[in-house]
Amino acid sequence: MKFYWLKQSLVILFLVLFAFISNFNLVNPYLTMENPFLKQLLVLVSVSLILFACNQLLYNHAKMKKEFMQHPLWDKMFIIILVWLMISFVLFIVLFFFKPLQDLLSQHAWLMFLVVYYFLFFTNLFILSIVHKVMDSSVKVEKKLVITWTSSTLLIAITLFVLPSI
């Protein structure tokens, strides 16, 4: 049990340090890139690392709780998470247009990383629920998580590289 909490704490510490370093680089840019492709590639690698950390949290939980993803509700989880994501997105947009949240985010830009982590985690969970629904129930959670990480990273890559050129 202690080893589980240690692993989860290390992953969360990685995410906090990653947000701190990213925020520091945004405020004090030491490395400037003029090439838009390199910027997109850096964002892709960063998001891929964040998604890997999110999947690591889920993997550690699955190792601890063997009944993870066994509940019948997981067959409908993609609908629940999609509705949750839509409500969260609308709520974020509404709150963003209020002056206090705008001021808070402009003064403390690192808070935006929490919002990014939140949406990436739930998007990743949404993709995991689709993978769970599509795949056979005998497939191990570890394999589902690898497919989820690959699919999520591919979705981000398509969004970054293909959609802007359309």
Image (cartoon, helix red, strand yellow):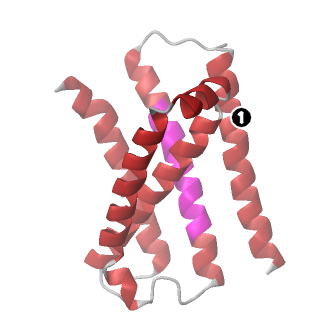
Q: Is residue 85 above or below residue 71?
A: above
Amino acid type, mark 1: Phe
Residue lying furthest left: 166
At 80% from the left and 67% from the top, the residue drawn is 6
At 61% from the left and 85% from the top, the residue drawn is 65
Quadrant containing the N terminus is bottom right
Tell whether 142 sits left or right of 151. Answer: right
Residue 9, magenta (yes or no): no
Nearer to us in this view, 75 or 1: 75
Residue lying furthest front: 99
Residue 105 visible to an observer of this rendering: yes
Q: Is residue 101 above or below residue 72?
A: above
- Give the quadrant of residue 76: bottom left
- Give the quadrant of residue 11: bottom right
Quadrant containing the C terminus is top left
Q: Residues within 10 Å of mark 1 (few under 14, many from 20)?
A: some
Q: Is residue 137 above or below residue 155?
A: below
Magenta span dominant secondary structure: helix
Q: Is residue 164 above or below residue 114?
A: above
Image location of residue 107, percent across then percent down: 66, 24
Nearer to us in this view, 2 or 104: 104
Residue hosting label 1: 20
Q: Which residues are magenta?
A: 43-58
Residue lying furthest right: 2
At 63% from the left and 37% from the top, the residue drawn is 111
Image location of residue 158, percent across then percent down: 28, 40
Residue 149 visible to an observer of this rendering: no
Image location of residue 114, percent across then percent down: 60, 44
At 46% from the left and 9% from the top, the residue drawn is 34
- Give the quadrant of residue 149: bottom left
> SS for tag 1?
helix
